[in-house]
Image (cartoon, rainbow, N blue to C red):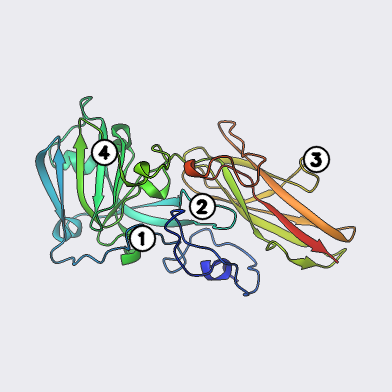
Amino acid sequence: MTLTRRALLGSGTALATGCDAVVLDQEPVPETIEPITSNEDFYVYSCCFGADPDPATWACPITDRGVPIGTLDAAWLAAHAATPFEHTLQCIGSTPTNIAISNAIFGGIRLVDVLAEFGVAVDPSIVQLYLVGVDDYDAGMPASDIEKAWLVWEMNGVPLPVAHGFPARLIIPGRYGVKNVKWLASIALLSEPIVDYWTERGWDAEAQYQCNGFIVAPVPGSTVPNHQALAYFGIAYAGEDPVTSVEITFDDFATTERATLDYAPGANRWVLWSFVWTPRREGVVTAQIRVTTASGAVSSENPAGTNYLAGYDGGMAVEITVA
């Protein structure tokens, strides 16, 4: 069985937290997580009620410190071949009760190459990359992000679905989905920064991915049989800093055991992990994970994380009953 958002999450929207509302449904616990999330099952969040641009009239002007330098439109996209790249997106409001993270093969062109085609070279006087969507949502990033950003118009080999930014969006490696603007309406290079939508509302201005991990199965509150092998599995991610290990503990980190990294392709892509455990006594059991990255970053031992406005940085805990 493939993990889908329907298998884990209920429907709804939570504008206050910046992500989909979550209610665990009654479907069977999934047996695995697919490395590449289908377009249908990729998480969706839109702060400003979304958009549905008409490709016949869609246009995205690009300006350099107020000077128009070019315009993206459907004809421009059609004239360029999209380069595929695998990338994970996670919502900055993702939590253990709102596991909003997915992985796909996107297709597009590096933004720096787009700018070069319009005759623009990024210089030190540019301090911010500023994006606005058709829904009037905006996001600002340091100019250094121009070198790694992607203009994207394909997802898993097909045109971007409307829910994911059709006709085109930007993908910014290293930054939560809050900075990855959909339905692009304008791209600006600025010499003076603008405070963007979510920063005005208290969310972290940098929105850099934190080292974090989730237990997808078993579901919290489950009852499992004693002396029968039980599969724990889940997700770990830290953006550009590759996850190198996931540990699991059943005694509040007095001891830990290494989980198996079943899918660990490197930076900007999630890790899928698993661990098989056999209970030896009845009662309530709490398992928690700890994630470590190549740089030495470690997830917080607080399963709720430390600062939700900066992104989840914990290792999730799950309580079950052995009977």
Compared across the picture, whether 42 is left or right of 120 comes to right
What label does residue 314 carry, if any?
Answer: none
Q: Secondary structure at mark 3?
A: loop
Q: Is residue 278 visible?
A: no
Determine the CA span between mark 3 and mark 2. Answer: 27 Å
Amino acid on which the number 1 mark rests in the picture:
Met
What label does residue 129 carry, if any?
Answer: 4
What label does residue 94 carry, if any?
Answer: 2
Q: Earlier in the sequence, mark 2 or mark 1?
A: 2
Amino acid on which the number 2 mark rests in the picture:
Ser
Residue 277 point in image, percent of width and height: 79, 56
Compared across the picture, whether 87 is left or right of 53 comes to right
Determine the CA span between mark 3 and mark 1. Answer: 42 Å
- Is 292 above or below relative to 19? above
- Which of the two residues, 72 or 51, is positioned nearer the viewer here? 51
- Is 243 above or below relative to 137? above
Amino acid on which the number 4 mark rests in the picture:
Leu
Q: Earlier in the sequence, mark 4 or mark 2?
A: 2
Residue tagged 3: 255
